Amino acid sequence: MSLTIKLIRFEVPKAKTNLIGRVEFRGVAHITSELCSSSTQIDVNQSFIWPLARPANDEEPLIVELRTQTTKTLIKTGLSHASGGLMGGTATGTITSSSKCIGQYMMLMQGLIHTGFIHVEDQLVDISTSRSIPVVVTFEAKYVSPDDAAGNFEPTNLVRSIQQQSISCSSQSLDDDQQMLLDIEQNIANLERSLNKGEYVKRIKKNNEKKIN
């Protein structure tokens, strides 16, 4: 069982940098590499896989986000003092980063569970106002169910197979019955011939006895 998401692209009103895509399912998030584009179309073409220990259910959400990433570098400088003067200094740096959600797309797993594959192209929503924004995401989702993983199981195929087997068994049973009737008829015919032959032999014997007498 698995869920695979391929982020294809984002479309934004104006070119932006320092963007990242984020996809979350069951509390586990995958993040794209930094996205930069000089145009309003940001190509992503990155795929993420969630191995699943249990089947997905209809009410579970899949979340796709476009976020801005801010990276800050903080430098701390330390100076040492000796004999009343400056002897030297040391510098250490730490890097911190944070991101802010521009827009979010959320869907329930219901449709994907039933179809196994979907292609989505839709607007994102501002999570603070729940209103659509002029940012479009395009992605594909593929869900491999336990039945598919075990051999592409389809109930319709099973029903069709059972029906075919039933028809085959019925035909075979009909053929066996017909053959049995033919055998019975053949046995009756043979018996009649034997009886007729016996009667004929008796008549000949009687005629011969009459001639002798």
Image (spheres, rainbow, N blue to C red):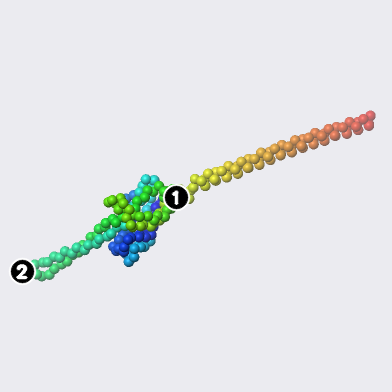
Label 2 is placed on what type of residue?
Answer: Gly
Residue 64 in view in this figure = no
Element at badge 1?
Answer: helix
Q: Residue at x 39, y 52 (%)?
A: 3
- Give left or right: position of 138 versus 127: right
Q: Taking 135 as reference, is 161 left or right?
A: right
Residue visible at 33% across and 54% down? Answer: 124
Q: Are marks 2 and 1 in contact (CB under 8 Å)?
A: no
Q: Earlier in the sequence, mark 2 or mark 1?
A: 2
Q: Nearer the viewer, mark 2 or mark 1?
A: 1
- Judge whether 88 appears above or below 137 on screen: below
Image coordinates of residue 106 in percent, x first then y, are 34, 51
Q: Nearer the viewer, residue 125 or 184?
A: 125
Q: Quadrant of residue 195?
A: top right
Please determine whether, in this image, residue 108 is positioned above or below residue 31: above
* Mark 1, residue position: 115
What is the quadrant of residue 201 in the picture? Answer: top right
> Residue lying furthest left in this view?
84
Q: What percent of the width, then of the height, locates residue 180?
A: 68, 38
Nearest the eye: 19 or 33: 19
* Residue 3 in view: yes
Q: Position of residue 161 (x, y in %)?
A: 55, 46
Q: Which residue is mark 2?
A: 84
Cα–Cα span, label 2 and label 1: 77 Å
Residue at 66% x, 38% y is 177
> Circle 2 sits in a helix, a strand or a loop, which is it?
loop
